[in-house]
Image (cartoon, helix red, strand yellow):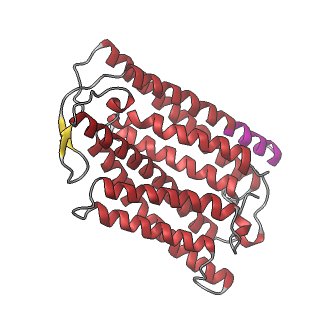
Amino acid sequence: MTADQLASLSDTLFSISIALYSVAMVAFCAQLAFGRRTTRARELVGAGGPALPAPEPTPASAEDTRGRRWGAIALGLTALGAVAHGAVLVTRGLATDRLPWGNMYEFSTATVFVAVVAYLVFAVRTPGLRHIGLFVLAPVVLAMVLIGLFLYAEAGPLVAALRSYWLAIHVSTAIIGFGIFFVSGIASILYLVKTRSDERVAAGEEAGGLLARLPGAAALDRVAHRTAVFGFPIWTFTVIAGAIWAEAAWGRFWGWDPKETWAFIAWVVYAAYLHARTTAGWRGKPAAWVNVVGLVVMIFNLTFVNMVSTGLHSYAGVS
């Protein structure tokens, strides 16, 4: 195939991946609709949190079976979407004869791909976490649509400033770190929502709706923490590798460029989250809020800093 044909195939696969993720999202909705209702139990809300009433599975029923079936279908569709998504990057790389993250369109597409893969790993290892699929895929589909509408760039060669082996090191780890932190942030948001729901149940309100079918607050907190633990050293390496590349390209390791500054702010926030998560008085909701702030900082760094602010990283913008 020619480069133009590969680029066209990449664009087509991008649309296919959005379609598959969208159908998977509908299947996850069906899983929640037909899944088992839950009633009484007690569990710790977050690490070190007080004991609160939380859902306990009822005996298996025909409704439960349908829920599990829809969950398996949704997970399979998500995996197919991830395959198509990965193929978007592969064909884009073949079309341009380089690593497929040389602009905002490619970087963002790769970041969302890592987030989906991270979710799939957790969903396969812990089947109960499949119930958060809707809440992961909804922002994934939204992000993919926005990427296609506002960040799309024609396949082409790298700008001169990015023609370095550091692209494979620094940018690759940034993509992996951001994708993992994305899942961590979503898990913390769900943890805060679930904790609030459990508190209402403790006050005598009836549990029901989608929140009753989410995993327990403690399980969501563990997912948020474990993904952050995994992503933090990767992001640390990203910041260090970026400083080394800056010295090679611009003759200084650090210059407080907007991109450098916000990458460092993100590192500080996630370091604070990991510290808070193991500190008495900060465990549970306070630490989760720090993690949510980390996600907001990462999104701000990807969008506003890249697209609005000016600096030495401006060449890595939309085109």
Residue 18 placement, left or right of 199 = right
Question: How many numbered markers are drawn?
Answer: 0
Q: Which of 1 and 203 is in front in this view?
A: 203
In the rendered image, residue 251, in percent from the top left (x then y), is placed at 65, 87
The residue depicted at 68 percent of the width and 80 percent of the height is 249
Question: Image quadrant of residue 5?
Answer: top right
- Residue at image position (51%, 75%) is 240
Q: Residue furthest bottom?
A: 251
Expressed as whole percent of the image width and height from the top left, the position of residue 179 reads 51, 53
Image quarter where the N terminus lies is top right
Farthest residue, direction top: 62
Using the rendered image of the protein, determine whether residue 219 is visible from the camera's viewpoint.
yes
Please give the name of the residue rendered at 57% of the width and 35% of the height, measured from the top-left corner. Answer: 81
- Quadrant position of the C terminus in the picture: bottom right
202 sits left or right of 181 in the view: left
Magenta stretch bounds: 2-14
In the displayed structure, 144 sits above or below 65; it is: below
Picture quarter containing residue 299? bottom right
Examine the rendering and report whether any part of residue 54 can be seen. Answer: no
Residue 242 percent location from the top left of the image = 57, 74
In front here: 155 or 177?
Answer: 177
Q: Does the magenta stretch include residue 183?
A: no
Relative to 195, is 295 above or below? Answer: below
User: What is the chief secondary structure element of the magenta stretch?
Assistant: helix
Against 295, residue 272 (above or below) is below
* Viewer-nearest residue: 151 or 246: 151
Question: Does residue 169 appear left or right of residue 233 in this picture?
Answer: right
Q: Is residue 8 magenta?
A: yes
